[in-house]
Image (spheres, grey):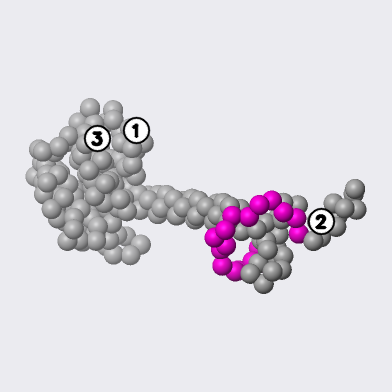
Amino acid sequence: MNQLTTLIIEGNEASRKQIKKALETTEEITTSIIEAESLAHSVGLIPHYDIDVVLLNCELPDSQGFNTLRTIIATLPEAAIIIIADSEDQNKLASLYLHYGAQDYLECRNVSCASLQRAIHYGVDRKRFLQEKNDLLCDLNDALDKISTLETYLPICCGCSKILGEDNRWHRLDEYHGKVFIKKSELQLCPVCTDDKHSEA
């Protein structure tokens, strides 16, 4: 794992120091550490750093619960977010925080070098996997849009799905590299399909 930049967002100074100390002693992770004690402070810092990981207590002096998480996700969509909970109420919300976009969850009392190392590794890997999955879905949607465009604007044989190219020849879809026609074509048959149809008649 390359050098990381980690943002600790925690309103309690003692908890923030505990998290920072545990993070500084991790042997397998090299990270630059940034600290913020409120949501407003963190939002002000974010544009100045390339942040990879956020260790977030959602109960802050100026923001609580899901509003905190939503704001951080919107501001840092590519960062892995690990919730640090310091109360029973937050513990009960753990699964919901994960459902709404956090990558992992730790209880403040259980924060240690080992637990942070595991959570960061898992969080970064999970975020990368989700990003790759999202990229694949976007590529698939783009491909489907292109197919839809071809079906709408290119002269396509309704028998074998070959495309009438600019050279006035019929090409297989996977071989066609010409420009998109701007005129919508009516249903038609290529010569081969026309002959086959006449043969059947």
- For residue 112, say whether it is visible: no
Chief SS of the magenta region? loop
| Residue 182 forms part of the magenta stretch | yes
| Residue 86 forms part of the magenta stretch | no
Residue receiving disc 1: 95
For marks 3 and 2, the one nearer the N-term is: 3
Q: Position of residue 77 (x, y in %)?
A: 30, 50
* Amino acid of disc 1: Ser
Which numbered disc, 3 or 2, marks the residue closer to the eye? Answer: 2
Quarter-wise, where is residue 102 in the image? Answer: top left
Residue at horizontal 35%, vertical 53%? 124
Give the camera-side residue of 157 and 96: 157
Which numbered disc, 2 or 1, marks the residue closer to the eye? Answer: 2
For marks 1 and 3, the one nearer the N-term is: 3
- Eyeballing the image, is 21 above or below 169? above
* Amino acid of disc 3: Phe
Give the camera-side residue of 71 and 144: 144
Residue at horizontal 26%, vertical 46%? 74
- Whole-Å distance between the Cαs marked 3 and 2? 62 Å
Residue at horizontal 24%, vertical 31%? 90
* Amino acid of disc 2: Thr
Highlighted range, magenta: 174-190
Is 128 positioned to the left or the right of 102 in the image? right
Is 119 positioned to the left or the right of 156 in the image? left
Element under disc 2: helix
Residue receiving disc 3: 66
